[in-house]
Image (tube, grey):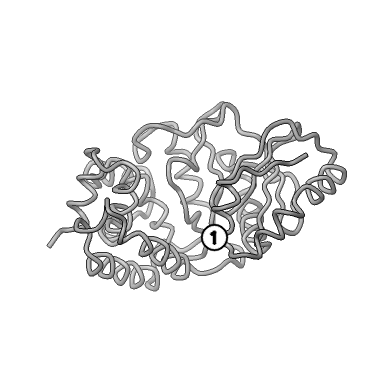
Amino acid sequence: MIEVPDEARRRLVVRFGPGATDWLDELPALVGTLARRWGLQIDGPVLSGNSAIVLPADRGVLKLHPDGGIAADEAAALAHWSAASTVVDLLEHDEGALLLARVRPGTAVPTALGTDPAVLPALVDLWTTPGAPDVPPLVDRVAFWHEKVREHLDDERVRGVIPPEVLDRGAGEAEVLAARPGHEGLVHGDLHAGNLLTGPAGAVVVDPRPCRGDRTFDLVDPVLVEGRPERVVPELARRLDGLDPDLLHAWCRALAPANAIAALRTDPGSARTAALVALALRD
């Protein structure tokens, strides 16, 4: 019996609309079908993110999306990166469902991502893998993210700190950057600390929201994990051949307002949040 926690249901309905309720009601039957087809034994409780239900199984991790297009894009990206040991392995894929290798111990990487020697090989692999499958353009991902962030401008922790015009300015700058030529290829699209897990030999990348465009975008979260890009960009420039430090700084400035809003909602009193707010409010 698959029991989806109420909070997971709420997040999926908010993300995908009322149609997600029907999908959730049919989920136990879907899991049973996939378990028989792929020879799985579900061995843990339901986990969830903002756009998927995740179930641990004996052969790996079963990930199910209400939107089959999201799953298809993720599968295409993971297949594209299949030669990279720093990216989670895709074992099976069907419409709306992925079976992924389990990453052990699988805890989130806790340190300064841009310079962590355990993380740098993953950044190098994403940076150097040529080409890209047919996934949406980066400009669409940038617009979607700012649209979601805009919903939180009235949060009491954000209101009066990041004005709407500051987010608008950053969104406009990011749209211009996404449309211009950069280090073209497959972009992970959501490379924050929670999507870099500790594996036996270093960090393993999971949960892409893939798009095509300037891979410099993927470096922003690793750089801004401390809120001070000037500390991290020079080291990345030494390690990533072809990285344009000025372009990376421009991406950090453009995305700082959205990052600051997220930080104000989750960690309002930290030094990192203060640094992100200062970067967002620059003249």
Provide residue 32's location: percent of width, then percent of height: 83, 45
Provide residue 109's location: percent of width, then percent of height: 44, 33
In the foreground, 121 or 277: 277
Q: Which residue is mark 1?
A: 15
Residue depicted at x 57% and y 43%: 87
136 left or right of 43 in image? left
50 left or right of 24 in image? left
Provide residue 280's location: percent of width, then percent of height: 22, 57
95 left or right of 208 in image? right
Provide residue 213's location: percent of width, then percent of height: 46, 65
Extreme residue toward the left, this view: 283
Kindly indicate the quadrant of the structure image that contains residue 267: top left
**Image position of 116 with respect to 136: above or below:** above
Screen quadrant of the C terminus: bottom left
Q: Amino acid at mark 1?
A: Arg
Screen quadrant of the N terminus: top right
In the foreground, 167 or 15: 15
Residue depicted at x 27% and y 58%: 257
**Image position of 214 with respect to 200: above or below:** below
Extreme residue toward the right, this view: 36
Count the marks: 1
In the foreground, 181 or 250: 250
Q: Residues within 10 Å of mark 1 (few under 14, many from 20)?
A: some
Residue depicted at x 43% and y 58%: 215
Residue depicted at x 46% and y 63%: 184
Q: SS for tag 1? A: helix
